[in-house]
Amino acid sequence: MTVVLRVSGLTVDYAGPVRVVRDVGFELRRGRLLGLVGESGSGKSTAALAAIGVTQGLRREAGSSLLDGTDLCALSVGRVRRFWGRRIGYVPQEIGGALHPTFRVRTQFRETLRLNAGLDKRAADPAAAELLAAVNVPDSALRRYPHELSGGQLQRVALALALAPDPDVLVLDEPTTGLDVNSQQQVAAVLRRAVRERGVAALFISHDLALLSEVADDVAVMYAGEIVETGPVTAVLHEPRHPYTRALLNALPSPLEAVTTEGIPGVPPGRAVEGECGFASRCPHVTVSCREAVPALVSIEDGRAVRCVRHRELRLTAVADRRRASTEPDARAVLDVVDLTCAYGTTTAAEGVSLRVHEGSVTALVGESGSGKSTLGRAIAGLLRPVSGEIRLGGEPLPAEPRKRTGEQRHHIQLIFQNPSTSLNPRRTVGDLLRHVTRRFVAGDRAAREAAIAETLAAVQLDPAVLDRYPGQLSGGQRQRVAIAAAFVARPRLVVCDEITSGQDVSVQAAILATLADLRRRLGTSVLFISHDLGVVRSIADHVYVMRHGRIVESGHTEEVFGAPRDDYTRSLLDAVPAIQPAVPSEGMPPEAVHEGSAS
Amino acid sequence: MTTTVDIIARTRKKAGPRRSAAASIGVSVGAAALFLSVGVALLGPLLAPEDPVAISGRPRLGPSSEHLLGTDQLGRDLLSRVLHGGWSVIAVPTAATLVAFGVGAAIGVWTGLAGGRRDVVTSRAVDVLISLPPLLMAIVFISAFGSSAVVLVGVTALFFVPRVVRVVRGTTAAVIASDYVAASRARGDSTAQILRRDVVPNISGQLVVEFGARLSNVVMFVATLNYLGLGVHPPQPSWGLMVAENTLLLRTNPLAALVPAALIAALAVGVSLVSDRVAERLAVDVAAP
Amino acid sequence: MRAILTKALTGLVTGLLTVMLASMVVFAAVEVLPRDPARTALGNESTEEQRAAFREEYGLNDPAPVRYARWAGGMLRGDFGVSVISRRPIADELWPRLGRTALLALTALLISVALGIPLAARAARRPGGAFDTVANLLSTGVSAVPEFVVGIGLVYVFASWLGLLPVLSNGVENGQWVGLILPALALGLAAVSYVFRFARVGVAETAGSPFVRSARLRGFSERRLTWRHVLPVASSAVVNVVALNAIYLLGGVIVVENLFAYPGLGTMLIGGVRDNDLPTIEAVAVVTAALLVAVNVAADALVAVLNPRTRQRAAAAESHEPEVAAP
């Protein structure tokens, strides 16, 4: 297959000694999609943008990006601009971020078709209609303004707009971020079709391995500014050769089976590391030779390459058996919600909801945005007064007016929010917060409270030095652990977790889940886990309730609901969620992995 | 998703933002201007050679060794008048801003904390009051009640309170709506505790910034009232009034009008530049990660 | 369409209420006046009988609400009362002066926008650069300085020193429009710095938005990006800010008129204050307030028209489902 864009040795610096991207090389082939995957700070966006000549104020130190023999990196902005649009298409991350807010869709197509393809208005309009049809967006969208379209439609229109001038290369920067699962699936489907039919060479930046397993042909894994592994997507995901890739896969939950997840100790460096393997400080297989020099990216069989001096010795099986042992539920209920209805002003968020959390279990509440799950969580935690229905804690009904709850009742229901940047007071230190919580909820004198704090910090694996820090000085993962500590230090009977892993990197998410699981085991706390992520839910929950438009549509043991869903909605959710298919244990690997339930 | 550049930028924050030399000069100029004008205003009366209201020479004289700035229409020593004339444009604005701020911040926090109907009603009332043109209203009030210091402070404060209320209410409401206040409420913290622990520390930066901005506005406002003859009574000198009185001397002795004008400018600009810098400083400290 | 009309109507109603409130405030303040208008008008040598007759003639003995109703009613019919000093109907002086003040205010506003926005665009092109820093400093400086100081500076430079323009603008009454230049400039410069600062932030923010980056990556020239993509979006934000502050900015029109002896409402007002001419003070205050509020309402309407998002917001609110994380 023809190579359209050949990137090699790309090295980009930020203001002096900070190297953001080092020695990055990849090839984009006609009709094939390369997934560039990495967590925050891996440099994937920077590398991709540098490859199409966008510097963003950074400095290209070395390397080239050849399109038809022309090095895009060596061109001035004025020259490379001629490639943008015409031969290189771009779809940004932000939903609607490709479209001008005050022009109609049709105007924007006319603009790019005129300037990049020389089509006048009469020729442009039918071309635009055809492009929209190719991405399953109705014609009527042409007359609309961007704010009148839904998120999924916006991203598909963005794709059509980028493909309008028939470019050779297409770069997509995490284009499905923030879309619900169904919209994401639609975008992925039209993208795959467009890439094949138009023969464009596509680069898809993402942090979502599962999504890439369904959309990409090849994958390149980035860590600390370098490419650490490349190859065809199924091969890399089933038989990863680099310890980081393996660790990433171990941290990934799956909606297809109940597996435990494992975090990666330490934090990513956020830039290229000098003189040694970038992953050395966190690698479970590190030896002396890893620290002697930066390893080279070495080609191994079948179009694969890996950057690890020990790759031959470490040819272990893909992932250890991560299957999760199932637990026997306790019969007693710690929380009973009976026929609860909640509203925000005039909109009903939840209607007639009944659920039960058994003592010592993890019960998940699953649903998409707008399903009402968060509202329910808030009502249970006492932030919202329900319109009708009852909430019982340990059999005892809670007062309808949350303000009337007793100290004891508040003690035993704690809430952890989704975004630790906003759920922690930025002007108070961690110690201040924990002491305030213990003063209210922990019996005994000052020494007893300090002991409780110390114990909880150890349990969430935070250094005691964190007590003197402000939230702004901690990383996202650390902040979430502080929030978890604040909830658990009171030793409550029930902890409500509202999307606590959303928006976190995969490895951080796994660490948070591990911390949660550990604490729960030790203290016997019950957890109501609210989430939209089916993989996470399958990996930690014993029971699950599925919510849609404010009602419970299905419930039961996790394995039963996921294995044999009875409700159509549950089934459609499971179908739409991207997942890495388990490896087929035969010699002849099928050339393309089976895609479950994909629309075409 | 944070990008690599974000992470790097965050760790570099300690090194300080890249301030160009010119911007730093701006702050130094502001501080110097402030220092100079306040110095003249406060210390001037001690240094004045003549009685500012007494006629000490022939009218409309240019600068000489006896009268360093010359004399005005009536023969009064201009230098002495300048040295005595700054007090009113410092005292009244400071007092007025303190009053406006005290009252406005209290109302703003009270209504931001409450939310609901109380908030809506207060906000509407504030919106309407803000739409009354302040200078115009002040002119009417002063022509009715006279221009004693009390009236000046009162009227000025009255018309700046709604602005303060609006800003303070906005900041307080944003804090009240945050997750960490929700968490405090869920825990059962009392309103007093939420106020002390959550609200005050998170609005104080904004309040300081707002105070500086208001002070700057009020200085301009009071100087303008003086100019229109609605502040200090003649024959007492005030910089604003002197600009008005000496406009006719512009051809023969421009200093008579320009010196007080320049001093007013120095004071106003000084307050503004310095408070801008303080705002920047605080914003950097309070910056969200 | 209905959304615009509703918005315009609400704006109009709020404006009218504001003017009404202003008139009540003005009337109330003047009512409490300790000075005796009769004594002021007739002088200290007048007798008590003369003063009593004066009060009777002008209806000064009636209770306050009655007098307010009479006064307000009169204004709505175009009768603004009679000047206690000149004994002539105030309306005669009022209309021509209103026209001249409106002209001055609008000219100043135009100057501020015509200068402010392009300057901001130029400054935002290279944030932190020489032009940007200097412009920012200057605008902070000028916006902190009272209008009369700017005015006196302009008078000195252009009239006194260079002798290009007249010091006083009372010639405008006789059609000497050159007298409009300096006052408009003085008022406009104060407003320019304000507009510049907000426009600069608006442009910088817009220039950094994703849609501009995407447009750039579609190969469009920087010039096209600035004029067709950035400025239209940034401008509506600027107009918004200007609209919100038109009243505050234009309050300076009173001072500027007095400095230049420009024959508008501002000079009429201060003249009335000096002479203790109550009816004049009341009438001019209310009309000036009405003028400023009218400018504000017009600017608000302009914002709504410019930005299709605000146009559609009311209609869209019903049809859209909540987007991101559920509340």
Image (cartoon, coloured by chain):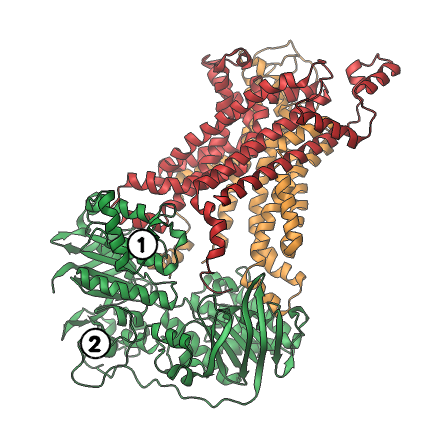
Provide the chain ID for the residue under circle 1: A
Look at the numbered disc 2 and give the secondary structure of its residue.
Answer: helix
Residue name at image x 64 percent, y 39 percent: B129
The image quadrant where one finds the N terminus of chain B is bottom left
Q: Could you tell me residue C126's position as x and y percent?
A: 34, 40
Residue name at image x 45 percent, y 77 percent: A515
Residue name at image x 43 percent, y 66 percent: A476
Q: Could you tell me residue A497's position as x and y percent?
A: 50, 73
Q: Residue A139 carries which label?
A: 1
Q: Could you tell me residue C305's position as x and y percent?
A: 46, 40
* Amino acid at the residue labelled 1: Asp
Chain A shown in which color?
green
Residue that numbered label 2 is attached to? A235
Q: Could you tell me residue C83's position as x and y percent?
A: 71, 17
Chain C shown in which color?
red
A392 or A119: which is nearer to us? Answer: A119
Mark with earlier residue (1, 2): 1
Look at the numbered disc 1 and give the secondary structure of its residue.
Answer: helix
The image quadrant where one finds the C terminus of chain B is bottom left
Whether marks 1 and 2 lie on the same chain: yes
A366 or A72: which is nearer to us? Answer: A366
Judging by colour alone, the chain drawn in orange in this rendered image is B
